[in-house]
Image: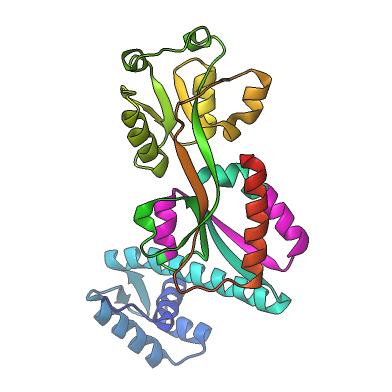
Amino acid sequence: MTQLPEIRQLRVFIALEDTRSFTAAANILNITQSAVSHSLKSLETLLGCQLLERLGKKCILTPHGEVFLFHAKKAMQQLEGAASKISTLNEWGYSSLKVGVSNSLCQYVMPKTLADFYAKENRCEVFITVGDTADLIKRLDDGELDLAFGLYSKSHTAMHPFVKLGEDKLCFITAPGHSWCDKKPEYSEEFAKERFISYGNDTITSSILTSHLSGIGIKQRATLSMSSMESIKEMVALNLGVGIIAEWIARRELSSGDLIKHDITPAPIREWGYYIGRSKSLSLVEENFLKMFSDRLESSLS
């Protein structure tokens, strides 16, 4: 494992760059000049390169020093920002909750959940990370998240218990002027002529779709993979292909007649819920958040 510089060493190096003087850096940090020299020398030994060159009483950065300075300042900014947030939480008695959520849930479920939560838990700060389920699971592994909301995948449940909160069915959607609105094709050869538009590559949704459609004899030509549900609906509205989406995602457009639903028989089913660390126990705040999220998800899916 690579040995990292100490915060003290970063402070000294940044002070030297700011002042270009060992004496001035020592005065700013309220330490002796010899302590500044010793800290720089130990840092250069650790990194295996020279960071500063002395020119009389002044000093300038070497090329290595320029590179290291950029990262050192960024690291200090991150640490100072974290310390400031922790100080605020301690001062005002706040707690925090780190939640990972898939793109669809973030757009259609999370806003109202947060409104419900902050109305009752106004002393807890919720930090949201958005991503595909696989990415959120990795962040859960790394301790960056307390909870990860997403789709069920058997490959993820070996190390992370999954709690199901609901399920949805995928369907085809088209523009009102699409030929399917007059007569839906009955044979796989006719389906294969269509341009399908679905969510993402290498996602749980794409895996479910590929397996399910091939299992019922629907062959797909090259699929357009979009990064959001809104982009799928927009592409379909322009009659650029047949979308594959959950009905609840397009409820408004289907109700207005801007998009038309066509059933997939039988329909692919996705399970929604949350992942949690195997040894983790839920706090009261987390339980309250889960209850509110579950209620909003159930309302959206119904």
Relative depth, front residue between 101 and 247: 247
Q: In this view, does 167 lie to the left or right of 215?
A: right
- Residue in the image at 73% along x and 55% along y: 116
Instruction: Kindly tell me whether residue 20 is visible in this rendering.
Output: no
Q: Does the magenta stretch include residue 64?
A: no
Q: Residue furthest front?
A: 266
The image quadrant where one finds the N terminus is bottom left
The residue closer to the viewer here, 188 or 243, is: 188
Q: In this view, does 101 lie above or below 179?
A: below
Q: Nearer the viewer, residue 59 or 266?
A: 266
Q: In which quarter of the image is residue 60?
A: bottom left
Q: In this view, does 246 lie above or below 235?
A: below
Tell whether position 124 is magenta. Answer: yes
Q: Which of 14 and 283 is in front in this view?
A: 283
Measuring from the top left, give residue 260's x and y in whole percent: 57, 19
Give the x, y percent position of residue 155.
34, 54
| Quarter of the image that includes the C terminus | top right
Measuring from the top left, give residue 129's x and y in whole percent: 52, 55
Q: What stretch is highlighted in magenta?
A: 112-140
Residue 255 place in picture, x, y as percent: 67, 23
Location of residue 128 with respect to 189 vertically, above or below: below
Q: Check the image and report above or below for 10 versus 149.
A: below
Residue located 33% across and 63% down the image: 67
Residue 244 appears in the picture as rendered: yes
